[in-house]
Amino acid sequence: MTRRIAILGATGSIGTSALDLIERSPELFSISAVTAATKVADLADIARRSRSALAVIGDERLLPELRERLAGTGCRAEGGRSALVAAAAAEADLVIGAIVGCAGLEPVMAAVEAGRTVALANKEALVTAGALMTEAAKASGATILPVDSEHNAIFQCLACSRGGDVSRIILTASGGPFRTASSEMMASATPSQAIAHPTWSMGAKISVDSATLMNKGLELIEAHFLFGLPSQQIDILIHPRSVIHSLVEFVDGSVLAQLGSPDMRIPIAYALAWPKRMPTPAERLDLAAIGSLAFESPDDRRFPALRLARQALEAGGAAPIVLNAANEVAVDAFLAGAIPFPAIAATVADALDRSRDSTPLSIADVLEIDRATRSRVGAAMKASCA
Ligand code: NDP
Ligand code: MG
């Protein structure tokens, strides 16, 4: 029996890495569903190659084209938001949540509510609705397996724990392309400089998040919800080589770490084969060639996003949703050349300052706070550009 996998966000960086692993082990896996937003030709190719039973395109206007491209393959084609959500909840042994941004929240939540095992890369879903999602997982019996490399590393280290004996989690960060850049240089940074990540190859949004260190801020919040530790027990450590993917300190002073080459196929494989392991083509670590590993503390002054994320986590309620929504709008604006790089963190800080205290009690509440923040931030940006 093969393990049936649904990939939400199959055309992206995580989605294609997962497909690469699955295609190398056809005796272990089959594909039940693949989804994308607009890359209809890529989605059709993937569905055809992987013999997926279902392909869903988020943009419904592209459904006729998807149907045409899949004619005669036996793969069912669907389109639109509700089809995406239905695909996430459909029967599968593992659902890979690899949509980028808060757009992934409803599909991931549908998979969790359906009691699926979810390999979660889509950190924004946990950042915006972590409490609701972990509660829903408890109620439905769903398992959330972290794919984000740091959280996957912690998950692996915690397998050696008896529970209740963790004193601290240490999330490592490469520091991104501007780790040693001056504030002046960052003020004139271009999108292509910001997405040129020194160690990882990733989608555009997360690459910009890595440059601002907002990625690590989102991961701080993600770690809080995944592992149930307060902000004070989650530290950030800059480690430019990205060899140690994160560490767990235990009450006796022992520290466990997970190491590997910076290749997302390693954490994805861990989730695909869990609770076993499977081979991957990832480059093996040659520690003698690497020679030494360096560490440094993050610089809150040049990278205010980290402080903002910690502030949002500690405030709770709507704050992480506001942080995430403002960041998504600001990153899009930066990538479109509409605002300079430092304006990303400034936009998020401003949105947090203006946000009202509230506690989202449902996914509808989360989506409403997300929508309202996007509209407020978008209007403020237009006004300042006018
Ligand atoms: P990409 O931008 O490469 O891919 C995103 C995927 O989501 C694509 O399949 C895209 O479809 C789809 N998508 C985008 N918007 C929507 C939408 N509105 N509705 C439905 N589908 C949508 O992103 P990554 O693969 O880099 O990242 C995916 C997630 O994984 C992010 O949350 C990221 O933070 C996280 N992650 C990524 C890592 C990496 O190495 N890339 C590492 C750790 C975490 P289309 O192609 O049609 O636009
Ligand atoms: Mg990560």
Image: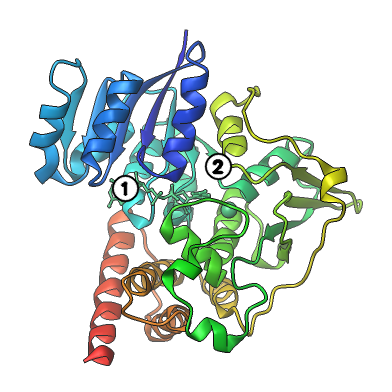
In the drawing, does residue 152 fall left or right of residue 215? right
Whether label 2 touches label 1, CB < 8 Å? no
Going by the image, does 194 lie left or right of 223?
left
Q: Which amino acid type is marked by label 2?
A: Val
Residue 265 in percent (x, y) is at 57, 36
Q: Which mark is residue 147?
A: 2
Disc 1 packing (10 Å; few <14; some 14–19; many ≥20): many
Badge 1 amino acid = Glu
Asked which secondary structure carries label 1, the reply is helix
Please determine whether, in this image, residue 230 is positioned above or below residue 310: above
Q: What is the C-alpha distance between the residues marked 2 and 1?
A: 18 Å
Seen in the picture, residue 183 relative to 50 is either above or below; the reply is: below
**Disc 1 marks which residue?**
106
Helix or strand or loop: what does disc 2 sit on? loop
Query: At 58% from the left edge and 30% from the top edge, which residue is drawn?
Result: 269
Closest to the observer, 188 or 127: 188
The residue located at (28%, 91%) in the rendering is: 384
Figure quadrant of the C terminus: bottom left
Q: Quadrant of residue 157?
A: top right
- Decide if residue 141 is on the left or right side of residue 166: left
Name above or below for residue 82 compared with residue 3. below
Q: Is 25 situated above or below 349?
A: above
Q: Residues within 10 Å of mark 2 (few under 14, many from 20)?
A: many
Q: Is mark 2 within 8 Å of ligand 1?
A: yes
- Asked whether, in this view, residue 66 is left or right of residue 347, the answer is left
Question: Which percent across, then down, holds residue 182?
Answer: 62, 84
